[in-house]
């Protein structure tokens, strides 16, 4: 072997020696084990998601239990009250605590006055087929004595201050002139009698637009059919909390209905 060959062999040996001293990274393990861990993570996530979905949600429950039933019940109660007490245009008022006022002079006669307030929320000015009546009652010898008038048909007298008075008809045994004037829902009764009236009342009828009457009649039907439709839809769309709330919410709806109905009756002076 020549010198050149021996030199090359030495370099190769040196390179091999140097190469054997380098550090290397070696990965060990089974690839299947990584797949198993990943599947376990996915299963945990799915289980957590399923647990979250199955957890009872209180917010939609209370929406179905309180919010929706109370709104529906109150709306139906209000509409029923308007339909019962006001949609036909009929109104009524009563006052048993009349307030004594100053004497007035009408056509040369002196009258004692009494004032009643009815809170009618209407303008007592009948037109066309509308009508409006008022009565005042006295008690004498355990008997009731009444005076009454149909406002739209009454004879009108005007006193010195420009106030218009309507003449009232009275019971045969009550021989005192009696008249009435009104402004908004404040009525003043003038009578020659010195007796204190026991009570006074008004009633009448205002015309109602057919569109309003149709709305009052159709809306309760829509609400009545819409409530169970929403409830059934909640169960179909897996919103059971809302559906369960609406089922038990029938009780609050019933309470809201009657509370609103009574309130409407009070507004129309039936209590």
Image (cartoon, rainbow, N blue to C red):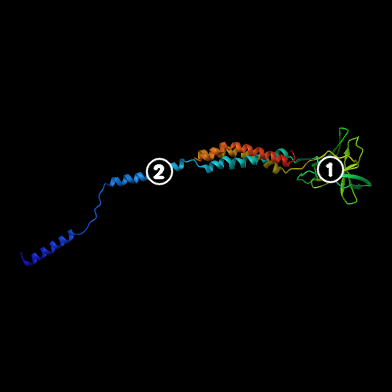
Which mark's residue is nearer the viewer, 1 or 2?
A: 2
Residue 79 badge: none
Residue 127 coordinates in the image, percent (x, y): 80, 45
Q: Quadrant of residue 78?
A: top right
Residue positioned most to the top? 142
Q: Is residue 95 left or right of residue 193?
A: left
Residue closest to the eye, 177 or 193: 193
Q: Is residue 167 left or right of residue 82?
A: right
Residue 178 coordinates in the image, percent (x, y): 89, 42
Residue 130 coordinates in the image, percent (x, y): 79, 42
Residue 46 badge: 2
Bin the neighbour count of mark 1 within 10 Å (Cα to Cα): few under 14, some 14-19, many 20 and up. many
Seen at 10% across and 66% down, the residue is 7
Q: How many marks?
A: 2
Residue 151 badge: 1
Q: Is residue 165 left or right of residue 56?
A: right
Residue closest to the eye, 215 or 266: 266
Q: Quadrant of residue 17?
A: bottom left
Q: CA distance from mark 1 to mark 2?
A: 79 Å
| First along the sequence among labels 1 and 2 | 2
Q: Is residue 82 visible?
A: no
Q: Secondary structure at mark 2?
A: helix
Q: In which quadrant will I find the N terminus?
A: bottom left
Q: Is residue 107 left or right of residue 134?
A: right
Residue positioned most to the bottom? 3
Q: Quadrant of residue 96?
A: top right
Q: In which quadrant will I find the C terminus?
A: top right
Bin the neighbour count of mark 2 within 10 Å (Cα to Cα): few under 14, some 14-19, many 20 and up. few
């Amino acid at each position: 072997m020549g010198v050149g060959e021996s030199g090359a062999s030495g370099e190769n040996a040196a390179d091999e020696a140097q190469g054997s001293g380098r550090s290397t990274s070696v990965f060990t393990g089974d690839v299947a084990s990584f797949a198993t861990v990943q599947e376990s993570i996915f299963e945990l996530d799915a289980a957590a998601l399923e647990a979250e979905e199955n957890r009872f949600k209180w917010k939609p429950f209370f929406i179905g239990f309180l919010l929706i039933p109370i709104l529906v019940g109150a709306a139906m109660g209000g509409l029923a009250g308007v339909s019962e007490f006001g949609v036909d245009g009929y109104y009524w008022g009563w006052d048993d605590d009349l307030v004594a006022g100053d004497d007035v002079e009408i056509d040369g006669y002196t009258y004692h006055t009494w004032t009643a307030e009815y809170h009618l929320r209407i303008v007592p000015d009948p037109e066309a087929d509308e009508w409006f009546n008022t009565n005042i009652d006295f008690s004498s010898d355990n008997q009731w004595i009444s005076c009454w008038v149909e406002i739209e048909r009454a004879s009108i007298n005007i006193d010195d201050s420009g106030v218009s008075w309507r003449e009232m008809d009275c019971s045969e045994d009550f021989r005192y002139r009696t008249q009435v004037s009104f402004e908004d829902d404040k009525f003043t009764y003038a009578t020659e009698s010195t007796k204190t009236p026991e009570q006074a009342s008004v009633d009448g009828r205002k015309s109602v637009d057919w569109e309003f009457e149709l709305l009052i009649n159709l809306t309760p039907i829509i609400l009545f059919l819409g409530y169970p439709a929403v409830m059934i839809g909640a169960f179909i769309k897996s919103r059971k909390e809302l559906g369960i709330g609406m089922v038990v919410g029938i009780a609050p709806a019933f309470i809201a209905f009657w509370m609103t109905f009574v309130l409407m009756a009070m507004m129309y002076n039936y209590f």
